[in-house]
Image: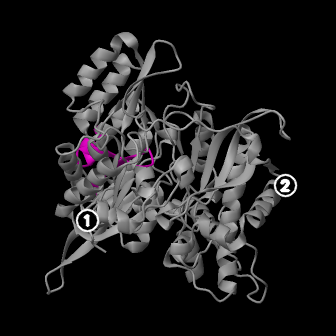
Amino acid sequence: MKNGEAMTAEFSTEQKRYLEGFVSGVQAGRVARGMSPIGSDAAAPPAAPMGPDAAHIKAQDATKAKGKKLTDQENWKRDENPFDAYARFKAQAEKGEYPKPPDNFRWRYYGLFYVAPAQDSYMCRLRIPNGIVTHGQFAGIADVAERFGGGYADITTRANIQIREIEAVDAAKVVEAVQDLGLTSRGAGADNIRNVTGTPTAGIDAFELLDTRPYAREWHLHVLNDRSLTGLPRKFNVAYDGAGQIAALEETNDIGFQAVEVADGASVPAGVYFRLMLGGITGHKDFARDTGVILEPSRATQVADAIVRVFVDSGDRTNRNKARLKYVLDDWGFEKFLEAVEAKLGAPLTRIDASHIKPRRAPNRMAHIGVHPQKQAGLNWIGVVLPVGKLTCEQTRAIAALARDLGDGDIRLTVWQNLIVSGVADANVAAALERIEAMGLAAEASPVRAGLVACTGSTGCKFAAANTKGTADAIARHVEGRLELDTPVNIHLTGCHHSCAQHYIGDIGLIGARVPVGDDGDTVDGFHILVGGGTGADATIAREIQRDVKSEDCPAAVERLLGAYIAHRAYATETFFAFANRHDIDTLQRLAGDDAP
């Protein structure tokens, strides 16, 4: 028997089919990347990219054709799409191995972040459209965090949940356990469309113009079921605000859909529409701007899809710091960008003069805390204060039981790092408050704690320069013991330039810094302090007032600022925002008794 015949005889029918499938897959992958199939004429021009990744590959190729270099991340996802690597991810987890940088990036597509050196473990971030979960899901999250994580959960500034301290061997188990709950972590990190946010009191707020839940859900499912919307030049945020009492901070997102009421006399029928806002990224000192476009709410997903696809084609794939929608808009201008969106849609967008849009009601800055009547007669929502967004598993289960027993079964997360239990009958409010107190939580907060926001900080994030949550708690305790504030003040602490806690929009914002001490080059935790940020109608980027303040000195520094506000405000109801923005920085430093540069 000849050697070739002997080798052929060794393959069974099943093996041959496997090899045929394998070769077919390799060929398809080469074609998708614009490469010639194996065995074809090498001189033939490369085939056009095909499949769900085609637009991304074309954008990468166009970048390289201009003589530019792709970022490492662009090459990593081109070499192996993360969603094609799940089997390898599971095998790596079963061996208890943590990833090297390329896979650390890829596994973020599954919502898993390897956060060393801050913690030698994974963090898992979920996707929760409009920030609403059922009581069963919430209790299930506690089970996952207790079994595979550190025994607690963090509520984020995108109305989301993170589970931390996950060992490598449990990484895939967490992803699958979350899916067993009817939730997902898919696309919650890396170059994807992140968790979609909406008004937390959607459907129960007497003042809302629109219930955002169906639109957030539709977009969430649209993204999950279309792989071509993954692998963007960088992350992408979308928010829906229904004009209820609690702000969704849509102006801080790449796309903000803002419910507005159009009056009679416009070129469209009177009624409720979404106003389209684009380009928000407050970490880069910019808010989403009104495009002049309005749309029927039913078109929101279609329009968002077209916007993202223009970004896929045009976003910067050579510089991660410039790879956001804002920079395309800065380069092109809004009109050119909107024309490209219209080309994707195959239809014009509707523009009307702002004079035809009725003024929006200002949000209630304390509506996410305490007891508030719903639009449904006899029912209430209760906003529960969480210590800088952290919940133990016991508290998580207790909240779930409260929603099941005395509410409508839902838990609603907010961008203020707290949660709301909805559907509590008038007769059950007192019992609900007693149960919340028994958990070690509260439904009341001081004007400082109600607006206190802090990112993970150096205890759990490798980028952070300081302990944000610890410093936030120290500020609140210090100020509460010395000052009596009668108006809410938002204090935001973020650990690094990524600005997850959005320090630029706080009345007082703090960003982590390594503060030099002594002459030998040593540094300690500290912050730069900013003042005068705002959102909504007051959308303003905060200004720096003090640099390199050691963490231990931040509580006193914030006390001086708030003390100056109380002593020098123009009238009893003047907000800190108004006070800070009617003075220049030199005057604010003098009034606060601090002349630091």
**Up/down of 429 relative to 38, above or below:** above
Q: Nearer the viewer, mark 2 or mark 1?
A: 1
| Part of the protein shown in magenta | 143-167
**Residue hosting label 2:** 346
What residue is at 41 percent from the left and 49 percent from the top?
157
Residue 149 within the magenta-colored segment of the rendering: yes
Image side of residue 353 versus residue 453, left or right: right
Residue type highlighted by circle 2: Gly
Nearer the observer, 556 or 527: 556
- Pick the quarter of the image with the C terminus: bottom left
The disc, 2 or 1, on the residue closer to the chain's N-terminal end is 2
Nearer the observer, 391 or 292: 292
Nearer the observer, 580 or 399: 580
| Residue 397 image offset from top left, x and y in percent | 28, 31
| Residue 15 image offset from top left, x and y in percent | 55, 63
What residue is at 69 percent from the left and 68 percent from the top?
313
**Label 1 packing within 10 angstroms: few (<14), some (14-19), many (20+):** many
Nearer the observer, 597 or 523: 597
Q: Locate residue 207: give its quadrant.
A: top right
Residue type highlighted by circle 1: Ala
Q: Is residue 106 visible?
A: yes
Q: Locate residue 338: give its quadrant.
A: bottom right
Q: Label 1's element? A: loop
Residue 272 within the magenta-colored segment of the rendering: no
Q: Label 2's element? A: loop
- Pick the quarter of the image with the N terminus: bottom right
**Residue hosting label 1:** 466
**Up/down of 300 relative to 105, above or below:** above
State the separation of the CA atoms marked 2 and 1. 49 Å
What residue is at 65 percent from the left and 70 percent from the top?
330
